[in-house]
Image (cartoon, grey):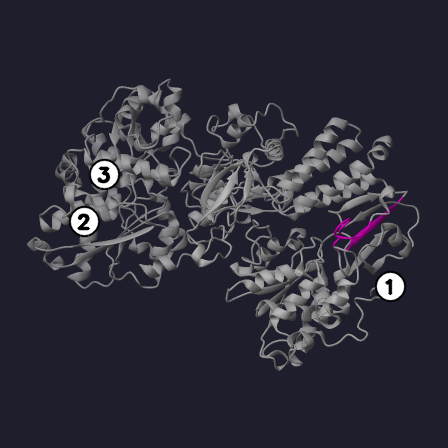
Amino acid sequence: MDKIVKDNRAPVSQKPLVMAKVDKDAIGATVGIEINGNPYKVMLGTTILEACRENNIHVPTLCYHEDLCLAGVCRVCVVEVEGMNTLQAACTFPIINKVKVRTTSEKVRKARRHVLDLMLSEHYGECYSCHRNGNCELQKLAKEYGVDSYKFGHIQERRYKIDRSSYAVVRDMDKCILCKRCVRTCIDLQEVGVLEAINRGDKTKITTFMDKPLAEVVCISCGQCINRCPTGALKANDPSDEIWNVIDDPSKHVVIQTAPSPRAAIGEEFGLPAGISMTKQMNRALKMIGFDKVFDTNFSADLTIMEEGTELLLRLKKKLVEGDNNVRLPQFTSCSPGWIKYIEHFYPEYLDYLSTCKSPQQMFGAVIKTFYANENKIDPANIVTVALMPCSAKKFECNRPEMNASGFKDVDYGLTTRELAQMIREAGLFLPDLPPDTFDEPFGEASGAGLIFGATGGVMEAALRTAYELVTGRVVPFENLDILPCRGFDGVKQASVKLENVKPEWSFLEGVDLNFMIAHGTANAKKVMEALVRGELSNIHFIEVMACPGGCLGGGGQPIPTSPEIRKKRAEAIYQEDAGLPVRKSHENPHITYIYEKFLTEGPCGHLSHKLLHTHYVKRGKYIG
Amino acid sequence: MIKNKSILFNRENLGDCLAIALNKNPQDILMEIRESNLKGRGGAGFPTGTKWMLAAASLANKKYVVCNADEGEPGTFKDRVLLSDFPDLVFEGMVISGYAIGAQKGFMYLRGEYSYLLKQLNDQLEKMLKEKRLGKNILGKGYDFEIEIRLGAGAYVCGEETALIESLEGHRGEARNRPPYPVNTGFMGNPTIVNNVETFVTAAIIMSRGGEWFTKLGTGKSKGHKLVSVSGDCEEPGVYEVPFGISINELLKMVKAKNAKAVQVGGASGYCACEGEFERQISFEDLSTGGSIMIFNQSRDMLHVLRNFMEFFVEESCGQCTPCRIGNKKLLEGVEKIEQGDCSLSYLRELIELGKTMKIASKCGLGQSSPTPFISIMTNFEQEIFSQR
């Protein structure tokens, strides 16, 4: 693993702050500083902004984001440092000696107000027609600084066309304030690099390679840029109007499946602190909005575990018993559509390593339009499937042309957590006040294994809970089924489980160390892929990759803002809910047993499974015509 | 060609600067440069000795020397003369600084529009290599140093040292956050000194003439002589060597300017002096310039002059920070409003306040200096501008 970690290349767009060379003995030392006349002690190398925040001194920011390297371009956080002629950006100024800082002097206030007035003069549109109304950092600042007029005018005409080409991300550059958070998200955080600034001065704009529409570049649809945009310049492609239409159409049977992550975060949209699970209140809201059935995607997550786990065991068997060298190992998970698009663009030669399983979203859609339609005697042509997802790439995924093995589109609409919150508000409901409600049968009760898909490492943990038991007949040797090596937010995690005293049919796995890796965020996925390309992963069997930092709970459709702390809280909510569930292993989900008895009778990876629940991938490459 | 009689940039009795320098130890060179009180000739006037000493003090394995030959300030063309007439001393100055700070590699960042000089500069490097004045074991002293010339692509902001370094690294030319400064974290994260062409030549000459000799020239805080490029309404425009402390009046006489109404000192981003200020001096303590002097006579419309400058900055702002990107545009719009006769005095005051904010809140020197002509012209010529409309 050392090699993989060392391969981390430097960010490309804006350099992170590189500390001035400090005497080694001094590192870790504190330095006494003065802020607004009061003395404080901070660690050497702390930025002024960090020092202020540690001591509860408010400094406004815009281009600064906890997840990103520093830019220092918006100039909203400027402060006065004694002895310097110019104001300094608090976010980038490293404290290496005794500085005296003023955060609210006349100069500072005037400068911030000017900066704000300038931004507003170029910021097209009005707050009341903006999807970020009430959750916009620019709007918040304008209020904080008492802006009541446009001192330097206000742009009246659009300069750019809205780019709606992508299924996932809509870009309205007239609302862009050029903080470059999206650029830094794309190239530094995700290492995809779709966005960059072009032109100079007044003509500067953020755009794609050759100014192409987003759908024609290597955007992986992860939507991380949306989560970090301070204004309304970026948003997900919102299908809620169409969903309202089908809900209002009595001839349509509208079914919604809800992924594990939205329920752990949607409370934030209603002012609750991060980390409060809203599963049951959300069920009630969905029913009140008018969905005919509310199902739990955890069911198809369990289904994924059965299919993907079986696929892995079959690959291992082919390799170890039959000596088939065409079998590709390690097997990579395929639940994250952003990750799928990433590997299709950047490592198209390695698609055979991916599990052929569809994601839980798509599996569920296929099951609803076949098995469910048949059992309930509903014409699948009249069924509309909506997927509530923490994700913008799911919108792209459900529109992939191959996702219609039943003869119908598996999933008709991907809806994000943010968009559902908006629908709930529009229906006049306040989520936290709603009485609890259950999911609908037959796909209501799912396992905790499906639930933890929402956090990075969750798929691996769920797979191990099932695979270990299938192979050995015993439960995984971890207390309370909590496979802790799978948890946490390290970029790339690696661990192994020894398979001993296996069942006779799995004798070829006797004594084998099942080695697995977990990566989240495509920057970490890239490290893993580079190690694979160098041939360093030959002893690894299974790798979970999620496109978004933190896994699905940090997805591009989740409530804004996001931060490491918020993602940690959401993960805690998910693991807590799992711990309290009666069924915590996918293979013990009674609906799973039922569907393999009644419908997928050949078992996991059987003929019908392959038709409905598995898929193939497209070699996209980096150059798109 | 330097038009007047040179004292500083004069080869008469000038010794072999490089040989003299390499016979000293690096510490002595640093001391000599510091004693000379040489300040950076690009315009900002940072003490060269201090800069070199900071880089020398670093324990890093790799250090770099960069010659800023991006000469992009409107009205400046003195580096072009140095690159044509004194290329040997430019490069020798680079080698000397490299020796002093412990660098093995130097870059010359040459203005894209000067690409016609590239061949003769490369020939000069070739010649120095042959004469063992560059490359391995220079002059048998066991010191290695190589120089590579890289071309800019025409962005004004790349004359700002951190934007220049970004450009050298192959990135978009945008200024970095300072601190940390290039002497700590420069090219590829290594300690780097960036100096103007004239600074290197002057440093080389100081090696031969001595730091003490140098301090006898100029004023109390501005030692030595300075090259200025004079353009505009005068009979004899060109590059002149002037002692620091020369007044604008003396300068105007020297270049035979008649009826001068305004003198723009320091290029587009400089200060516009009016007649009443012509006794002011060219020096770091009074009117500082990287070399550009532009003269406007009574026939010129100062609003038109200002418009020209502001159009330049709107186009040349790199666009990353808010005050510079939008501020310059607002100042230009203000000029247009005045032209159309619909700018109130109170809005003009607001724009001047905005200019003051830009000077302290912009990320780099571009935005910090671009409001200077707006503020100085609007202050010094307000009556004239408004009475004509």
Which residue in the structure is indicated by mark 3? A450
Q: Is residue A406 above or below residue A271?
A: below
Q: At label 1, which amino acid type do we have? A: Asn
Mark 3 falls on what kind of element? helix
Q: CA distance from mark 2 to mark 3?
A: 16 Å
Which residue in the structure is indicated by mark 1? B4
Q: Disc 2 vs disc 3: Cβ atoms closer than 8 Å?
A: no
Q: At label 3, which amino acid type do we have? A: Gly
Q: Is residue A239 above or below residue A18?
A: above
Per the rendered image, the range of residues in magenta is B281-297
Q: Disc 3 vs disc 1: Cβ atoms closer than 8 Å?
A: no
Q: Nearer the viewer, residue A312 or B307?
A: B307
Which residue in the structure is indicated by mark 2? A310
Q: Residue at x 65, y 62 (%)?
A: B49
Q: At label 2, which amino acid type do we have? A: Thr
As drawn, which residue projects farthest toward the top?
A: A428
Q: Taking the image as drawn, is residue A407 in sight?
A: no
Q: Residue at x 63, y 35 (%)?
A: A107
